[in-house]
Image (cartoon, rainbow, N blue to C red):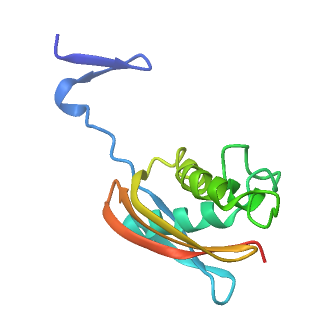
């Protein structure tokens, strides 16, 4: 049979198309701290990564417990050894992207503790739109 039934409506096979997901969101103007226009594609993925890394996990009721980055819960803690941070920070950064369908994975992650409460990070991100380099500072200040 060349028909498919969706919600009680029969559709011929050629009428059923694969759903194309569009990732379109508001563009954040970080300099002026406002929303201006919209963004999609690789820019939307980069903005999503930036936002996830800049958001402290568990700190805002608007986000569930899967959103944000745990790095803020570790940096500045003088009881943690450099060895612990070197092993744990890459896992925390990767974990920030686990629930984002646009981000397929990251490679070549490097980071440098700049001071007690900030880290410079750099990595290559694979997204559904292609690959991109990402770098920035995660800061709790």
Quadrant of the snapshot with the N terminus:
top left
Res 22 → quadrant: bottom left
Q: Nearer the viewer, residue 21 or 67?
A: 67
Task: Judge from the rendering whether residue 126 lies leftward or rightward of residue 97; answer left or right.
Answer: left
Quadrant of the snapshot with the C terminus:
bottom right
Res 86 → quadrant: bottom right
Q: Position of residue 74 (x, y in %)?
A: 75, 58
Rendered view: 37 above or below 71: below
Which residue is drawn at the image coordinates 79% and 50% (left, top)?
58
Q: Residue furthest top?
A: 1
Q: Position of residue 110 (x, y in %)?
A: 47, 67
Which residue is drawn at the image coordinates 57% and 52% (left, top)?
87
Q: Nearer the viewer, residue 131 or 13?
A: 131
Total marks shown come to: 0
Task: Judge from the rendering whether residue 32 lies leftward or rightward of residue 11; answer left or right.
Answer: right
Task: Judge from the rendering whether residue 125 lies leftward or rightward of residue 10; answer left or right.
Answer: right
Which residue is drawn at the image coordinates 63% and 56% (left, top)?
83
Q: Position of residue 17 (x, y in %)?
A: 25, 36
């Amino acid at each position: 049979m060349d028909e498919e039934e969706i919600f009680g409506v029969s559709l011929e096979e050629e009428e059923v198309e694969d759903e194309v997901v569009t990732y379109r969101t508001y563009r954040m103007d970080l300099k002026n701290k406002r929303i201006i226009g919209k963004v999609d594609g690789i820019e939307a993925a980069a903005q999503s990564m930036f936002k996830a890394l800049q958001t402290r996990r568990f700190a805002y009721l608007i986000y569930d417990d899967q959103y944000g980055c745990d790095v803020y819960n570790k940096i500045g803690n003088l009881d943690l050894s450099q060895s612990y941070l070197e092993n744990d920070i890459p896992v925390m950064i990767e974990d920030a992207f686990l629930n984002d369908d646009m981000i397929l994975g990251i490679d070549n992650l490097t980071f440098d503790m700049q001071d007690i409460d900030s880290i410079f990070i750099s990595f290559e991100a694979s997204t559904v739109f292609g690959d991109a380099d990402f770098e920035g500072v995660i800061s709790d200040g």
